[in-house]
Image (tube, rainbow, N blue to C red):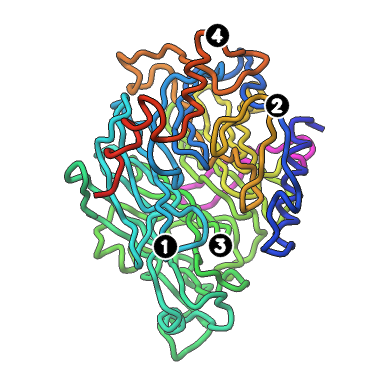
Amino acid sequence: MNTRWIGLSLLAALSTMAAERQPHRSPEESFGETKRQLGLIKHTDKAFPGYTLFAPKHFTKTYLMDNNGMIVNEWESQYEPGQSVYLLENGNMLRCCLTKNKAFIGGGEGGRLEEYDWDGNLVWEYWLSDDQNLMHHDIAPMPNGNILAMVVEHKSMEEAVQAGFDKNALKDSKLFPDYIVEIQKTGPKSGKIVWQWHVWDHLIQDFDKTKDNYGDVAANPGKIDPNGSGRRAKAFWNHFNSIDYNAELDRIVISCRGNSEIWIIDHGISTEEARGTKGDLLYRWGNPSTHRQDGKQTLFQQHDSQWIPAGCPGAGNILVFNNGLGRGHTSVDELAISKKGETKMVWSYTDPDPKTFFSQEISGAQRLPNGNTLICAGVHGTLFEVTPKGETVWEYVNPVTSRVLKQGETVPLDHRYHAQNAVFKIHRYPANHPAFKGRNMKPNYTLVENLENPVSPERRADREHADMKPGEGKRGGDRGGKKGARK
């Protein structure tokens, strides 16, 4: 058994048990806290050299870190992440923000995008957060400078029933189906939606002949059955949690957690065409029962489906973090899709003892140019890199909760029974990435003392600054103050 995961599997078991406990019980009352080694755990010469971008889930800073666990750059916001962060080729950092919109609750809430330059200045902001619409989870920067984003829209119980939902299978009095928008930046505080695609335009149901969208579900696999999951539908019905864009194919891949499926749609059509049959799903994979097809379920409330980019082994295949909720263990799976739409798994990683690797929610993975795979076990805040044969060659445990922990401190659990050092997903950028051209890449400090990188005396002042909350200290107000405020 890989001892790294003994504590994590216990934490996962507690998280699973938590769902059966009374909701008024706090994590501390139920399970207490978790003590773990923090910071850099392992770094070998087999690790892919580069810089890892990560945003602690309960903190307002985003960090760029080298493989030695040293912070090279940081950006500060007024907002916790909501949820993804990306580094652009010009060195700017694009960030999703949690706006705490009370009209939509279901996980991954966002509502605001921010772009900071390398020096931490806010250069662009955009809001899509009101009582009818809310951006959430993830975005996909595009080569043309536009941004693809996932949004939920509000539908009433009456609208859902008219669309063919079984009223008795709806858990809530409203529904939040997903749609996708392409946003063009039009000014430092504005953007324009130039393309969109809605789940609501591609429904089919055989539940009620008197309602909309009635038809043969099995004969129309490109359409979405409102009752296809076979279980009661939450308001956050589709629960998209990642989006990726393939410029060569002009297609979009979506992780639809609500169905335990990945969906691929065509972006190379107009918004008007996207409302019709041309906008139906091109491919879907993971759970055949949702559209009345034979076959075994292979995805289990997965996250972070993405095309493996050119220059990496497996280029053109799809990598997905298969959380395994309901299966009892997590895997990272690589899928090859033929031109005829046939999908097969060509590589998979899990722990030698599968039940010891379990991150039941959030999380992600990235194929690196040397063939290794970078994995974020998000619920536990554990980041690690494995070779194609499954050898761990780099590992880091995020030490940041609502503050930066010191080595030896316990990691508390949040309201969802996740460790408070949780991370949604991460990205590693190679040392020759265009964002770093002409930049000072000198390491600054480590977030936490550890065996491989103790904090030197001259860096302790930086370490103390890292502990500061937004608005404290000389730089806190500059980075998280008026520049980041909504006007």
Label 1 vs 4, first from the N-terminus: 1
Toward the viewer: 331 or 404?
A: 404
State the CA–CA distance, disc 4 to disc 3: 52 Å
CA distance for labels 4 and 2: 19 Å
Is label 4 or label 3 in front? 4
**What's the amino acid at mark 3?**
Asn
The residue identified by callout 3 is 259
Name above or below for residue 137 compared with residue 177: above
What label does residue 231 carry, if any? none
Which segment is the magenta one?
Answer: 332-356
Instruction: Identify residue for label 4.
Output: 457
Q: Nearer the viewer, residue 164 or 116?
A: 116
Mark 4 or 2, nearer chain start: 2
Question: Which mark, by number, is residue 408?
Answer: 2
Q: Which mark is residue 178?
A: 1
Q: Residue at x 32, y 37 (%)?
A: 481
Q: Tell me where residue 409 appears, x and y as whole percent.
A: 68, 30
Bin the neighbour count of mark 3 within 10 Å (Cα to Cα): few under 14, some 14-19, many 20 and up: many
In this picture, residue 300 sits left or right of residue 352: left
Q: Residue shown at 24%/58% (left/top)?
A: 270
